[in-house]
Image (tube, rainbow, N blue to C red):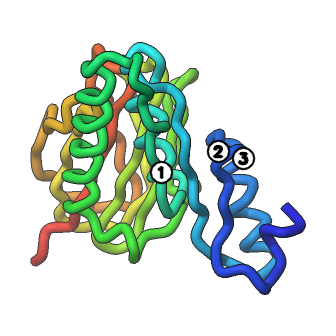
Amino acid sequence: MTIATDPHYDYVDVSQASSTLSIVAYRLALAEAGTPRPLVVSKIYRRLPEQGGTNALWTRFFVGAASARFHRPSLNHPESIIAFQDETVGNLGRFIARVPFWQMDIRPEVVNSSPQGVSTHVLTDLENHYAIQLTGEGEGEKLGLQLSPGNWNVTWIDPATGEDIVNYEITLYTSELELDIPSELDHRVLHLERIAD
């Protein structure tokens, strides 16, 4: 952490300390020290869906890592691992192409309420795009958000497939929004995009 906040460095490599909590801790420390810089994160060892590989990669994006990758497979790993890694990176890449993430900040305060046992990570520019990752059980329950009134396109995405689950438009007249969370998933992504007047 001392090296991370040293002003002489252009980026921080946290590849060996890349849990969600440690990435958030580094970001907070860099902000407090006035030395914001990219966090390079590598070596995701959870190489399969049942090991949480999809969750691990998407979470690194949502908590502000500048880079992330799966650990390279060795010769004794089956082709299914390589196929999973390629598909997972591709699904995240297609989502990233939909949002101007370089203009977005981590803003957990926009979540007013979420089901017990569900964790949320938020990226937003507070004007036109909100991207929210939800992990954990909470099927059929509500997510409460704080955002500006207007017309919004609401899209729920399944990170495991990269496909849209639900897509619809809403008109918000107040600064509070409550949405139903899609059921039967323990990893969901919500994208809210303002519709131009």
Residue 110, given in percent of the width and then of the height, sits at 50, 56
Mark 2, residue position:
18
Asked if marks 2 and 1 touch (Cβ < 8 Å), the reply is yes
Q: Residue furthest right?
A: 2
| CA separation in Å, label 3 and label 1 | 14 Å
Identify which residue is drawn at 23% across, 39% down: 156
Determine whether 104 is above or below 178 in the image.
below
Q: Which percent across, then down, holds residue 131?
A: 36, 54
Q: Quadrant of residue 186?
A: top left
Q: Is residue 180 visible?
A: no
For badge 3, the amino acid type reads Ser
Q: Are marks 3 and 2 in contact (CB under 8 Å)?
A: yes
Q: Quadrant of residue 166?
A: top left
Q: Is residue 120 left or right of residue 190?
A: right
The picture places residue 124, in percent across and down from the top left corner, at 41, 64
Left-right relation of 79 to 3: left
| Residue that mark 3 sits on | 22
Residue 195: give its label: none
Mark 2 or mark 1: whose residue is earlier in sequence: 2
Residue at numbered disc 1: 68
Quarter of the C terminus within the rendering: bottom left
Q: Earlier in the sequence, mark 3 or mark 1?
A: 3
Q: Residue furthest front?
A: 75
Amino acid under disc 2: Ser
Q: Nearer the viewer, mark 3 or mark 2?
A: 2
Q: Determine contact: label 3, label 1, CB under 8 Å.
A: no
Circle 3: element type:
helix
Residue 160 sits in quarter: top left
Q: Secondary structure at mark 1?
A: loop
